[in-house]
C-alpha cells in the first residue's frame, strides 16, 4: 500500500496506518495533491523541504514527487532521503500519453514554465499552465463553485475549446518542471534518464542504500 503525504504530520499518520511506502508530494506538483489532514492551501511545503522531513520520521521507503523533471532532480531527491521518485508532467508531453495534442504542445511551448495554483478548474486546489482560462478564474472576486460542480462547469467549456484548437481555454495540468520536459518517446526518454542519472548517481546511491540499511537495523532493534 502506498500513501501520499503533503506534510510531515500526514506522513506520520500514514506510518501509523501501516503503509508500505509514502509519496512525499511537494507543492510544485502538477494537478491535484492528496492533502488529507489540512486544507491544500495549508499544505504548501516544497519538495526540497518536505522529502527530508518525512524521510527522517518514517521507516518505510519515501517516494519524492513534485517538480522533478530530469536526472538532476532524481539524484537530488535521493540525496534528500528518497528511495524513488514519482514523475508525472514530463511524461504528459510524450506521444504515448493520454493528454490531448494541444496539451502536449503546450507542455513543449514557451509558456510551460509559467504555472500557477488555482481552484478554478475543479473547485479544488491544483496546478496548471497559466493561460487565459486560469487567469480569468483566478481573478479576484471570481466565484468558484465547490467540487465537482466547478469541474463540470469548466469541462463544458474545455471540450468545445479543444475542438476549436483553443488551448488558452483549456485546463492544462502541469507541475513546475514542465519546461524541463523533452519527452517525445517514452522509451527514449527513460533510457536517457537512466543513463544521465547513472553518470552522477554513484555516491548518492551508496549513501541512500547505507541510510536505508541503518533504518532497517534500527527498526529491528526497536522491535
Image (cartoon, rainbow, N blue to C red):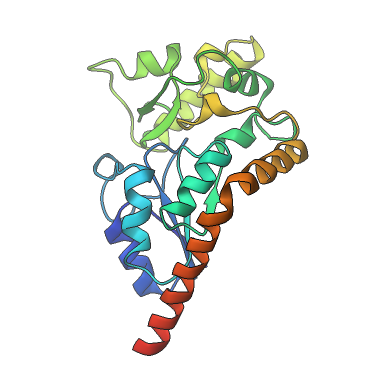
Horizontally, is 84 left or right of 148 in the view? Answer: right
Farthest-out residue, front: 203
Q: Nearer the viewer, residue 130 or 188?
A: 188
Q: Is residue 57 above or below residue 38?
A: below
Q: Residue at x 28, y 18 (%)?
A: 142
Instruction: Give residue 138's position: percent from left, percent from top.
Output: 32, 19
Q: Is residue 81 left or right of residue 159?
A: left
Q: Residue at x 61, y 22 (%)?
A: 103
| Residue 120 in the image, given as x and y percentages of width and height | 37, 26
Quarter assignment of residue 195: top right
Q: Is residue 153 left or right of residue 125?
A: right
The quarter of the image holding the C terminus is bottom left
Q: Residue at x 34, y 50 (%)?
A: 50
Residue at image location 35% in from the left, 55% down from the top: 52
Q: Is residue 46 visible?
A: yes
Position of residue 152 relative to residue 11, above or below, is above
Can the viewer see residue 173 in this picture? no
* Residue 17 as seen in the image, left or right of residue 166: left
Vertical placement of residue 60 versus 70, above or below: below
Q: Nearer the viewer, residue 90 or 194?
A: 194
Numbered label tally: 0
Q: Position of residue 130 (x, y in %)?
A: 43, 18
Front-most of 202 and 89? 202
Find residue 106 and report its image quarter. Answer: top right
Task: State the image coordinates of residue 75 (x, y, percent, origin top left).
Answer: 52, 47
Amino acid at each position: 500500500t502506498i500513501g501520499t503525504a503533503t506534510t510531515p504530520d500526514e506522513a506520520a499518520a500514514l506510518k501509523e496506518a501501516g503503509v508500505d511506502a509514502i509519496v512525499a508530494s511537494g507543492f510544485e506538483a502538477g494537478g491535484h495533491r492528496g492533502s488529507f489532514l489540512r486544507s491544500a492551501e495549508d499544505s504548501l511545503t516544497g519538495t526540497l523541504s518536505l522529502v527530508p522531513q518525512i524521510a527522517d520520521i518514517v521507516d518505510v521507503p519515501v517516494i519524492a514527487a513534485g517538480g522533478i523533471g530530469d536526472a538532476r532532480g532524481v539524484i537530488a531527491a535521493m540525496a534528500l532521503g528518497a528511495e524513488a521518485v514519482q514523475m508525472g508532467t514530463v511524461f504528459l508531453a510524450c506521444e504515448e500519453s493520454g493528454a490531448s495534442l494541444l496539451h502536449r504542445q503546450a507542455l513543449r511551448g514557451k509558456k510551460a514554465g509559467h504555472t500557477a495554483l488555482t481552484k478554478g478548474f475543479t473547485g479544488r486546489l491544483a496546478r496548471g499552465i497559466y493561460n487565459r482560462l486560469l487567469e480569468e478564474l483566478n481573478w479576484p472576486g471570481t466565484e468558484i463553485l465547490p467540487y465537482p460542480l466547478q469541474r463540470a462547469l469548466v469541462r463544458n467549456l474545455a471540450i468545445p475549446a479543444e475542438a476549436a484548437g483553443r488551448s488558452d481555454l483549456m485546463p492544462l495540468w502541469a507541475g513546475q518542471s514542465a519546461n524541463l520536459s523533452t519527452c517525445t518517446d517514452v522509451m527514449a526518454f527513460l533510457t536517457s534518464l537512466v543513463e544521465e542519472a547513472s553518470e552522477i548517481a554513484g555516491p548518492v546511491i551508496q549513501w541512500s542504500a547505507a541510510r536505508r540499511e541503518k533504518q532497517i537495523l534500527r527498526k529491528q532493534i526497536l522491535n
